[in-house]
Image (cartoon, rainbow, N blue to C red):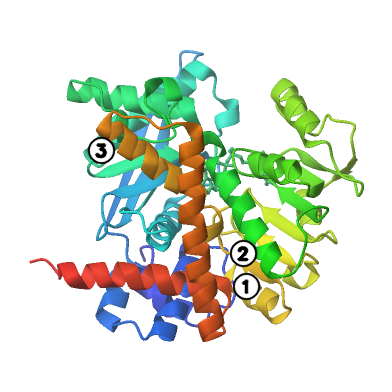
Amino acid sequence: MGAPTLLERETHMADVRESSNPYENAIQQLDTVAAHIGLDPDIHEVLKYPQRELTVHFPVKLDNGSTRVYTGYRVQHNLSRGPAKGGIRYSPRTDIDEVRALAMWMTWKCAIVNIPFGGAKGGVLCDPRTLSPAESERLTRRYASEIDLLIGPNTDIPAPDMGTNAQTMAWIMDTYSMHHGHTYPAVVTGKPVAIGGSEGRVDATGRGVYIVAREASKRMGMDLKGATVAVQGFGNVGGVAARILHEHGAKIVAVCDAFGGLHNPDGLNIPELMECQRNDGTLTTHAGGDPIGAMELLELPVDILVPAALENQITAANARRIQAKLVVEGANGPTTPVADRILHDRGVVVMPDVLANAGGVIVSYFEWVQDLQSYFWAENEVNVRMEQMMLRAYQEVVAIADRDNIDMRTAAYVIGVQRVADATKLRGIYP
Ligand code: NAD
């Protein structure tokens, strides 16, 4: 018997309560909102599937002279509202279902903040920490050549995600430009500023997390100044969010990366921790707190919890032990649908990934616009415009949550799914 088809798996899903498969969780989330808004069943069916999926197996020469074959993916979920947009992840745990889920979440996210993109995602199954810079460059250039079929400034625009960064984007931009005969800055976002990147892009996702944490705290009558915060993940999203929250007076009592974490109830010195990470590649060598595990950190008695590492961190197994009043999702998919329900019933407010971490894709949109126009904005202009878009989306989501008495994720999906459904319907089913 072969692997189950998407439809077989979906049918089976009706009785699945808790799944660690992010794509199954993404479909459950879509099903919940489809029932809530009475989504046309034909459109519902269309939105369950990614439109295109490419799997590539490609050889890379390693520094020791041997050759290793790597597997990579690029998935485009829905293109009704514009070209596909979404990050590329280098991870030893990625697979096609993770990439499908991340692509679907990108579709909703772009629609929720109302930017003209569809959703996509890419991934390469590898451990980026074990690759030398030269191996990483060869892997990236070969992967970029393999997915050249799909990407392009008008078709599909990648960006950084876990395990990739501005340098990765520079190599992809260069590889694509070499193949196509001239420089195409707009083929990727999250590039270094020196080659067409946008000011403010590095901080954008973490800054957006801060904006949502600030607004949600205000609404809950909680003062962000002095509020206690735990952050899981100390990379582009978690590290920046911790820094900006710290700058605005929040007390960051625990942070962690893949190697471990630090806890100090009196507050951690975030600038020192960042310096430590720059020097040692991890924050665990810092003496400013007691060691704490990544899962233990989630259950600390804090005001605000920011999961900013991986999917499936808050599940049926630990949702009842989460003590935070507010969860702001920096990562994609950190809370399972079952955990969502438990948190909602317990009165914990969850600001969902599709809104809370959308600052990155908003500034990626600005970067793409700047590249297409060859006209670049100052950092303050980028930050002000990003904040305006985040606030508008936040207010729209809160208004729906209040109107329908539903949790923030379902409210965000009401807006995102409806916008994508409307676009799909207006364009019609080809031919
Ligand atoms: P990153 O690679 O810069 O950082 C990831 C961090 O998580 C690192 O500190 C890493 O050590 C830590 N980590 C990895 N495994 C862990 C584990 N098992 N336990 C605890 N910590 C662990 O990646 P990033 O760009 O910060 O992405 C983090 C999350 O945010 C992902 O879910 C990603 O999809 C999402 N996201 C990223 C962006 C972006 O602009 N980079 C935008 C939106 C969403």
At 59% from the left and 26% from the top, the residue drawn is 130
Q: Is residue 324 above or below residue 229?
A: below
- Is residue 133 left or right of 113 when viewed as pictured? right
- Is residue 354 left or right of 236 when viewed as pictured? left
- Is residue 277 left or right of 133 when viewed as pictured? right
- Residue beneath label 1, please? 340
Q: Quadrant of residue 205?
A: top right
Depth-wise, is mark 1 or mark 3 nearer the camera?
A: 3
Is the Cβ of the residue at disc 1 closer than 8 Å to that at disc 2? yes
Q: Which mark is residue 335?
A: 2
What's the distance in space between the residues labelled 1 and 2, CA to CA?
6 Å
Q: Which mark is residue 153?
A: 3
The crowding category of the residue bearing disc 1, from other C-alpha atoms within 10 Å (few below 14, some 14 to 19, many at least 20), is many
Q: Do we see residue 417 in this rendering?
A: yes
Disc 2 residue type? Thr
At 26% from the left and 57% from the top, the residue drawn is 79
- Outermost residue, left direction? 431
**Where does residue 418 sit, x and y in percent of width and height?**
35, 73
**Where does residue 421 sit, x and y in percent of width and height?**
29, 72
Q: Compare residues 252 and 16 and report the one nearer the observer.
A: 252
